[in-house]
Image (spheres, rainbow, N blue to C red):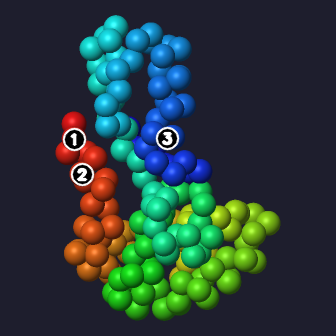
Amino acid sequence: MFKDFDDDKNIDDLTKRLVSSLKNKYGEIETSEGVFKIKSSGSSILVVPLGLPTDEDMSQLGITRHTMEDFLVKLLCSDSGAQEWAGIKIGELRNRAKSLKDKAPLNSSKTLIMTLGVVKGGKTVEDLIPEIIEKSDPKSLTGIVKHVIDQMSLS
């Protein structure tokens, strides 16, 4: 299960609510490193957190609700190919996002990506995802999503 960090800062905070919900529905649950084992059925659920809650760029941009779009914003902050393709510096993109503040929160990466869509002629977030990834250096992308890959290999 992929789960955005949202306001949580670590996997323990993220999983507390999930554990409570699963216990209410299934009874006894064992947890270890993001894996939930449901005793009554023998099933396991791997929780893979998405977002970059401890990233300095996210902090400097005022991002406090962490989602999968954090990875795209990080590429726009750090990858020259993504930056060149975007044609707008991340600080200017943040300033343009302020005009959307009545419609979307400024503390979310998704707002910055939605703003980039406007800059790119009305593209949706779904349109932008493959374009940003395609324009980025594979090493940059791998480095940014390394913790997701590591978490998935725990299962």
In the displayed structure, does residue 100 sit left or right of residue 130? right
> Is 18 above or below relative to 22?
below
Looking at the rendered structure, the secondary structure element under dot 3 is: helix
Q: CA distance from mark 1 to mark 3?
A: 17 Å
Q: Mark 3 = which residue?
A: 14
State the residue in front, 11 or 144: 11
Q: Residue at x 75, y 64 (%)?
A: 103
State the residue in front, 7 or 90: 7
Q: Position of residue 129 (x, y in %)?
A: 42, 67
Q: CA distance from mark 1 to mark 2?
A: 7 Å
Q: Position of residue 14 (x, y in %)?
A: 49, 41
Residues at circles 1 and 2 in contact by the CB criterion of under 8 Å: yes
> Is 125 above or below relative to 47?
below
Q: Position of residue 149 (x, y in %)?
A: 25, 53
- Amino acid type at mark 1: Leu
Picture quadrant where residue 83 is located: bottom left
Q: Which mark is residue 154?
A: 1
Picture quadrant where residue 120 is located: bottom right
Nearer-N-terminus badge (3/2): 3
